[in-house]
Image (cartoon, rainbow, N blue to C red):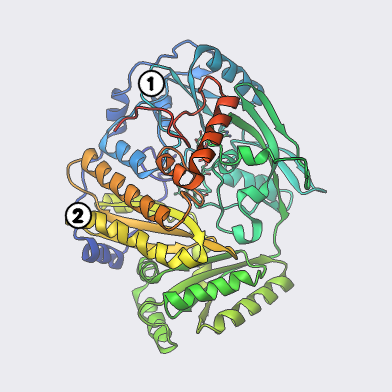
Amino acid sequence: MRRWNGWGDDATSMDLNTGARAMMVQRLGPGQPGRDATREDMLAQLPPSRLMGAHALIRTDAATRFAMALGESYADWIRKRFGALPPVPDGVAYVESSEQVRELLDLANARNWIVIPFAGGTSVSGHLDCPISQRPILSLNLSRMSQLLHLDKQSQLATFGAGTPGPLVEAQLRAHGYTLGHFPQSFEYSTVGGWVVTRSSGQQSLRYGRIEQLFAGGRLETPIGTLSMPTLPAASAGPDLRELVMGSEGRFGVLTEATVRVTPQPEHESFHAIFLPDWHTAEAAVRKLVQRKLPLSMLRLSNGIETETNLTLAGHSRLIGWLERYLALRGCGHGKCMLMLGVSADRRSARHALREARRTLGEFGAVYIGTAMGSKWAANRFKGPYLRNTLWDAGYSVDTIETAVDWPQVSPLMQAMEQAARDVFADYGERVHAFTHLSHLYPQGSSIYSQFVWATAPGGFAPNFKRWQRLKAAVAATIAAHGGTVSHQHGVGRDQAAHLQDEKGPLGIATLAGLCRHFDPNKIMNPGKLLQDEGPWAS
Ligand SMILES: Cc1cc2nc3c(=O)[nH]c(=O)nc-3n(C[C@H](O)[C@H](O)[C@H](O)COP(=O)(O)OP(=O)(O)OC[C@H]3O[C@@H](n4cnc5c(N)ncnc54)[C@H](O)[C@@H]3O)c2cc1C
């Protein structure tokens, strides 16, 4: 069953080995686990529903309403852990068809309800937060729209109900020999519709593309009618309406069906670990590699601190010790950086791509160590977030902040993001363990994905919320100062909305606001997300 106050299935857990625990204590001091609120504590706080008896499809029981109240951001997390209940939806409708969505949108529009689509609930940007509002709030749960509706093998197009989660997307395609190849780390729960409206990126985007390259068309139910986006191989028929829907974050309507471009299952897939002597060399190496446009499926470069952290987390300290001595002899000592490289293709192309990649990396002093670590990474590729549960239980908090920027700013921005976080915690006389990887590389630049671990502060919700707000604000300001994007893959939501103007400018924001008014004149659709046009919010 899905965990109500943490990541993932409650039957799965990730261990923090002795070495990793010692590393946390050494870098952050001892964690002080607090007492978590119970689900019963939370449910007891729910106010009465304002949608009781409003429609046969709308459920108003406390447990269902609470389950749709929050996503997976750090703020969402500590609300549940410390029992700080924000506003919750007044009702939840488990919709099963575009027609039901249409009917409920019409009703919500006529009665001035707020509507928040809820798909996988994996948002880490406050997309699912409910404002403090006089208007009743309806959550539209899309999880029952999870079927493969049509597969056109000739065109390699598959149409899914928008609420189909990653495992069901892949299982339904695999039965026909296809894959979408979209594997965000939230794959277990996030959905095809959620990916489209948040402009998501999967771990093998280098081969399969981001969701922007995969989304071929679909159906959006908006408050003023249905927007159909036909599938076409290409068109010069004016602006592409799909671009409006991608990244719309539930503001223009509900995506009910999504047609995506699929690929036959690859004949060969493997993941390889390679070490480079230092960050400067490693960055130059991956830049050269990605600009060669070899048919690789993944490049993921960890900086020195992340490499050290990952090797510690791997356990098997004797084996890792042996590996580190070998790497040091080959020129990859302190400060070395680990590169995970994926190849997914037919056997011949895979062999060629790997040989060429190794040749290019060899020019930079790379040490290739084979597939053992890569296979382990692949086996655990969706398990990393479970460590957050374990760390919380040990008294530590975790959050991630990501961006993308052109190559000249990649290293300066990465260092500045980590430093901004250290400065925030230094103000409290505390420390943060900050480490980074580049996970989506482009010939023009790269995404930057930083993770932050710190000792959870005593005192409950308020002091921890304050620290998190300061961390987010400081890192966001740093990103803006270096010309990075507000988000490479997690979207804007409520948490990043204040910073969007830096990126889009006043005319850009006015254009987006105009589109919201056009599709949604009564402002019922997920207000306050993407744009700062709703509030107040619980603090
Ligand atoms: C542990 C973890 C790892 C993650 N890793 C990645 C990653 O590798 N790559 C990545 O891109 N993201 C990642 N994310 C972020 C998140 O998974 C993505 O933003 C994902 O695309 C959200 O999909 P969802 O189905 O869960 O949507 P939800 O969280 O349910 O909703 C997100 C927003 O989209 C709206 N929405 C959802 N579906 C629809 C629809 N059909 N029509 C209209 N509006 C809709 C909601 O109203 C909300 O505003 C991660 C999150 C977590 C918690």
Picture mark count: 2
Rendered residue at 44%/12% (across/down): 52
Cα separation, mark 2 vs mark 1, equals 35 Å
Q: Position of residue 155 (x, y in %)?
A: 80, 48
Q: Residue at x 58, y 63 (%)?
A: 442
Question: Does the closest atom of ligand 1 sit within 8 Å of the Cβ of label 2?
Answer: no
Residue positioned 51% across, 37% down in the render: 509
Q: Secondary structure at mark 2?
A: helix
Q: Position of residue 371 (x, y in %)?
A: 54, 73
Q: In the displayed orientation, state which residue is furthest to the bottom.
A: 329
Q: Quadrant of the N terminus?
A: top left
- Position of residue 288 relative to residue 136, above or below, is below
Q: Amino acid at mark 1?
A: Ser
User: Which residue matches tag 2?
Assistant: 427
State the residue position of label 1: 133
Marks 2 and 1 close (CB-CB < 8 Å)? no
Q: Is residue 316 above or below residue 245?
A: below
Left or right: residue 338 versus residue 144 is left
